Amino acid sequence: MANNIIMICLYLLPLIPLMYLFSLARAAILPGRLSVFTQMRHYFDVRKDDVVGFYQREDMIKQFEEAGLLAAGFTPMKYRVTRDLGIFTFAMILNIRYILNVEQGYPVFGLVLLFLLYGALQLRESFPIKYLLLGMKVQYERQKNAEIFILQQLISNEYADKNTTKQNIYHMFMYMRRFLKYTRPAVDRFLEEYPHDPHNREKAFNSFARIVGTTEAQSLAEILYQVDQSSPEEVHEILTKRYEELKKKRQEAYRGAMKDRGVVAYTLTFAGVMMVIICGLFVYYLEYKDMMGATYNMN
C-alpha cells in the first residue's frame, strides 16, 4: 500500500512544474496588448531577477573574496545554485531508480542523507562551510605572503650591488608581475596608479597593501615607499633592516602552516582508527545477532 502511494506521488510530481509553467504562460498572455513572445520574455525577465535576488548573498561576498574564491570566479550565488541543482539531481536519480525497480524499496536512507548534506552545506554560522572558508582564507593569505616575501627578496637583490644601475620600483613591478598569481591584481593596481600622480606616490603603495590585505603586504608597501623616496645610499640599509623583520614573519607563518598540517594529519589518523574500531564492533554485533538467531531457531 505504501509503495503504491509513493508511486502515485512520483508520477504526479512532474505535473507540478508543468502546471506552474502553464500558469506563467497564461499570466503573460492574458493582457493581450503586446505580442505573446514579448510578454512572455518580459515576464520571465522579472522572474529571473527574483531568482537572482533569492540566490544572491551580499553578506558572503567578502568571505568568498578573502578565501580566494572570487578570484577564481566562484561567487556565493554560483555556490548556492550548484548546491541546489546537485542535491535536486541526486534526489531525482534516487526516485527514478525506485520507479524502475519498485522491489528494492523506497530510498528513505539515501534521501535522509541528502537532506543532512543539504543542511551541512548551508552558508550559516557554525556550519561546516563556514569553517572551510576560514581554512581557505588562511591558506590564501599564506600563498599571498609567500609571493610578498619573494617580491621583497628580489627587490633586495636588485639593490644589493651598489655598483650596478638600479631600476625603479615601477619597472621592477612591471617585470615581475608576469611571475605572480595571487598578488597580481594588487600589482596591476599599483602599476595603474603609480604614474598618474607623481606628487602622491604613497597612494599607489597603499592601494597595493589594501588589495593584498595582509600585514606582510603593508610592511612591504612601507618598505617600498621608503625605497622610492630615499637616495641610493640609504636604500641598502633600509632593505637590510626590514628584510630581517619580514623573514622572521615568514618563518612564523611557516611554523604555523606545519602545525596546521600536523593537526590535519592527526585528525585523519584518529578518524581512521575510530572507523576501524566502530566497524569491528559492528561486525561483532552482527555475529552475536546471528548466533542468537541460530540459538533461537534450534530451540
Image: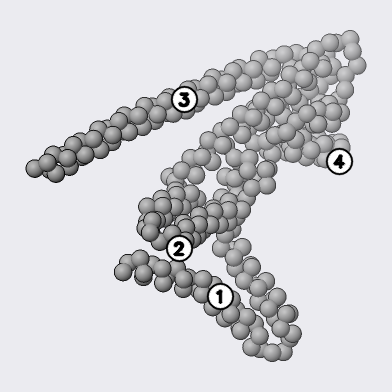
Residue assigned mark 3: 265
Say whether residue 253 is left or right of residue 274: right
The single residue placed furthest to the front in the displayed view is 298
Indicate which disc, 3 or 4, sits on the residue closer to the N terminus.
Answer: 4
Residue type marked 3:
Ala
Q: Which residue is mark 4?
A: 196
Quote the CA–CA distance across marks 4 and 1.
Answer: 59 Å
Q: Report the amino acid beneath label 4.
A: His
In primary-sequence order, the first of circles 3 and 1 is 1
**x, y percentage for residue 50?**
60, 68
* Mark 2 lies on residue: 99
Given the image, on which type of amino acid does mark 2 rest? Ile
Please indicate, yes or no, whether residue 215 appears anywhere in the rendered image: no
The part of the image, by quadrant, that contains residue 20 is bottom right
On the image, the x and y values in percent for residue 91 come to: 48, 57
Which residue is labeled 1 in the image? 18
- Please tell me whether mark 4 sits on a helix, a strand or a loop: loop
Residue 215 sits in quarter: top right
